[in-house]
Image (cartoon, grey):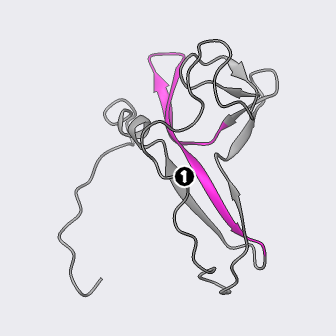
Amino acid sequence: MLNCPTCSKAVNIYAKVCVHCGGSLAPADGSPASPTLEPCSKCQHGQFVVVSPFYLPDIQNNGSITALPVASGLEGRWQVLSGGSFRAHVCLTCGYTEWYAQELKALAATVGKIPNVTIVEAKAATPYR
C-alpha cells in the first residue's frame, strides 16, 4: 500500500487513481516519466531497472509503504510535511544507480516550510564547468 498524495489514505501501489478521493497517483506536475536512457556511465552497458517512485516501508503506519520523499520535515508539532519523490535507474550489469527527483511542484511547495529546503539560483554557465 502507498499513501495518496491528496488525501493521505492508503491505496494499492499499482493504482493510477485514489479510490477514496479520486486523485491521481501519478506525478501531475509535468515531471518527465523518465529521462532519455543512455548507456551506463560506469560500464557502458544499456540495460536498466527503473523503479518509479522508489518506495520505503512505513513501519509506523500498519506496514504500508510510502514513496521516499526528496524533502521532509515537521509542520507544527505532529504533521509530517514532504515533497517530491525519487525515481531510481539501476544498471543490471554493474549496479550503478542514478537518482532523479520527480513531483517537482510538490518539492517547491516545501521551500520556506522545511528549514533545510531552499532555492539557489545557478550562475551563468561557463565553458570550464
- Residue for badge 1: 33
Q: Nearer the viewer, residue 50 or 109?
A: 50
Q: Amino acid at mark 1?
A: Ala
Q: What is the span of residues highlighted in magenta in the rendered image?
A: 67-92
Q: Nearer the viewer, residue 16 or 81?
A: 16
Residue at 20% over, 81% down:
126
Q: Residue 45 in the image: state x and y as whole percent.
A: 70, 83
Q: What is the quadrant of residue 39 in the picture?
A: bottom right
**Does 119 appear above or below 126?**
above
Asked whether residue 74 is drawn in magenta, I would say: yes
Residue at 76% over, 27% down:
12
Secondary structure category for the residue under label 1: loop
Q: What is the quadrant of residue 43 in the picture?
A: bottom right
Asked whether residue 80 is drawn in magenta, I would say: yes
Q: Residue 32 in the image: state x and y as whole percent.
A: 48, 52
Crowding at mark 1 (Cα within 10 Å: few <14, some 14-19, many 20+): few
Quadrant (top left/top right/bottom left/bottom right) for the C terminus: bottom left
**Does 60 appear above or below 101?**
above
The dominant secondary structure in magenta is: strand
**Does 55 appear above or below 34?**
above
Q: Residue furthest top?
A: 20
Q: What is the quadrant of residue 108 in the picture?
A: top left
Q: Residue 1 in the image: state x and y as whole percent.
A: 77, 28
**Does 125 appear above or below 77?**
below
Residue at 74% over, 33% down:
13
Residue at 39% over, 38% down:
105
Q: Residue 100 in the image: state x and y as whole percent.
A: 53, 57
